[in-house]
Image (cartoon, grey):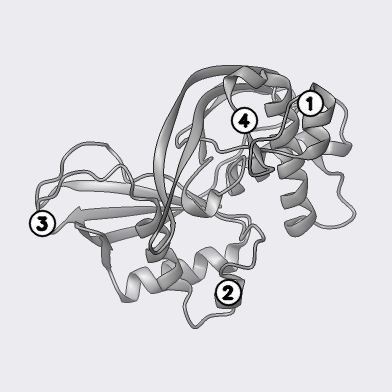
Amino acid sequence: MRLLISLEATSDAAYRHTYHHKLRGRFWKALRGTQFEDEHDNNQPLGFAFSNIFPWGDIQAGDERTVIVASPREPLLTTIASDLNMDPTFDIGDMRFRVTDVTPLSVDVGEPGKRGTIQTDTGVFVRLKEEHRQQYGIEADGDGRTYWKPKHTIEPFRDAITANLQHKHDLFAPDYQQGPEEADGDLFDSYELIKTYALPVTVTTGEQVEYVVSKWELGYHVQSDAHRRHLNLALDTGIGVQNGLGFGFINITNDAQ
């Protein structure tokens, strides 16, 4: 499930490409004092992902922009929508907006047999687990963690996003349903790397780190009802890590028979 949030700029501003921390803060403001507040900084995926504010470009007062937030947890989205309707102020640093409309959306990859492509609308941040490093002979970085780069090849990227989605499945899907790591076949049947880039990111107030993230076009062919659920979960939660900071948000860009 998704919320399409329509915005109107209330002042002129330059577009801030390092919006992640401030945009996350507006959604957490909506969750303050609710059943979800205790999940802040608990080191588990909250089960939501969000787009950038689009379209890109410098902002003039009166401009219309949009942001999308997605989650498999309908009560979480309902809580955010309720807050935005009561308090339409939507300030992301000096990018200042007011919410003009909040519309629920349902996105689905389609029934078994359907083919299509998914594009990562925000950069994907991927952490390689120890088993992935060992399997592919990848040395850990100096701090003991390794984040995916093109030199590591596509296979560990594939395994890492599938393992991450399995973790989200374990958190948010019924126990009796098969997870993506337990299924036959790959989550996606093609991986086209569009670009990688480094981005300074404020992870907490006063702490900034540089992330190397990647953008992809991912092909899919829905193999079964279970595979359909896995792909739809990816659409609801994002792929890779740090979805709660706005990374790994994905959209269907083409759905053909």
Quickly name the residue at label 3: 11
Quickly name the residue at label 4: 148
Quickly name the residue at label 1: 223
Say which amino acid is labelled 4: Trp
- Near mark 4 (Cα within 10 A), the count class, few <14, some 14-19 or many ≥20, is some
Q: Secondary structure at mark 2?
A: loop
Question: In this image, 68 relative to 106: left or right?
Answer: left
> What whole-number distance in Å separates the C-alpha atoms at marks 4 and 1?
27 Å
Residue with the most extreme front position: 142
Q: Secondary structure at mark 1?
A: loop
> What whole-number distance in Å separates the C-alpha atoms at marks 1 and 2?
34 Å
**Disc 4 and disc 2 in contact, CB within 8 angstroms:** no
> What whole-number distance in Å separates the C-alpha atoms at marks 1 and 3?
48 Å
| Marked residue nearer the N-terminal end (2 or 3) | 3
Residue with the most extreme bottom position: 33
Residue 130 picture quarter = top right
Where 22 sits versus 13, above or below?
A: below
> What whole-number distance in Å separates the C-alpha atoms at marks 4 and 2?
31 Å
Quickly name the residue at label 2: 36
Q: Secondary structure at mark 3?
A: loop
Say which amino acid is labelled 3: Ser
| Marked residue nearer the N-terminal end (1 or 2) | 2
- Near mark 1 (Cα within 10 A), the count class, few <14, some 14-19 or many ≥20, is some
